[in-house]
Amino acid sequence: AQSVSQHNHHVILSEAASLELGCNYSYGGTVNLFWYVQYPGQHLQLLLKYFSGDPLVKGIKGFEAEFIKSKFSFNLRKPSVQWSDTAEYFCAVNAWNYGQNFVFGPGTRLSVLP
Amino acid sequence: GAGVSQSPSNKVTEKGKDVELRCDPISGHTALYWYRQSLGQGLEFLIYFQGNSAPDKSGLPSDRFSAERTGGSVSTLTIQRTQQEDSAVYLCASSPGLAGPSTSTDTQYFGPGTRLTVL
């Protein structure tokens, strides 16, 4: 079955630490890849997305993600996290070879300690 | 409107009752999605509309769940004979149009959700 996995359920970091959240998917063929973020008490919003071209994608708030096709991965990174980055992060895949348009990963909760 | 809106924001109902959840997408968006987010879990895809038609209903968990969209705009998700396991946050999202491998129209814009509690 098609799936998206996120390696970490809960990550706890101190401010200024570097962040990498893993995301792997199981689709073949063409995919569009996304990271969404849900800040406490707010609704989901897009952080960044990859469609084609440069596999290193820059997003808002200093986030970036790298698409590695051979590894079916799309890991999210940030060199120095802030307390305001505390949120839930969801990786999502859009693959048009399959009937379901979007599949979301289970999410990773990030807690940044001040 | 400026964003996706959903109503009600909270709904408490008794087991066995029917509920209707409403989604108003961003004006002009032709694609509309319903998801369910249970406590401590990720998003579970329920159904997708392109215009008024639903090419993908694969995520509806049972025949108690149905959805419709009229006028290519507002959508209603109906849950009949609610069960306690239906308790969750129901999220709606819209996107501008048909997505493909090289378009930039696949970003989904999410509403605030409806928190459903079945007692």
Image (spheres, grey):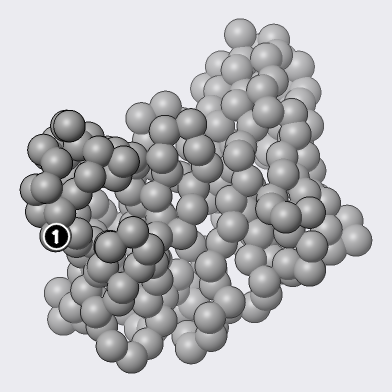
Residue that protrudes farthest toward the right in the picture:
B71
Residue B39 position, x and y percent, is 42, 27
Chain bearing mark 1? A
Q: B34 and B96: which one is in front?
A: B96
Residue beneath label 1, please? A79
> Judging from the image, what secondary structure is the residue with disc 1 in?
loop
Q: Nearer the viewer, residue B3 or B46?
A: B3
Residue B97 vs residue B78, the one in the foreground: B97
Identify which residue is drawn at 25% across, 38% down: A83
Residue B11 as seen in the image, left or right of residue A10: right
* Rendering coords of residue A65 (x, y %): 25, 69
Around disc 1, counting alpha carbons within 10 Å, would you say few (fewer than 14), some (14 to 19), or many (20 or more)?
few
Amino acid at the residue labelled 1: Pro
- List x then y, in percent, for residue B71: 90, 61
Q: Residue at x 72, y 55 (%)?
A: B2
Residue at (16, 32) in percent of width and height: A113
Residue B55 visible in rendering: no
Coordinates of residue B67 in the picture (x, y in percent): 75, 46
Which quadrant: the C terminus of chain B?
top right
A33, above or below A3, in the image: below
Q: Is residue A76 left or right of residue B3?
A: left
* Residue occupying image coordinates x 31% and y 41%: A84
Q: Is residue A89 above or below residue A65?
A: above
Determine the image quadrant of residue A25.
bottom left
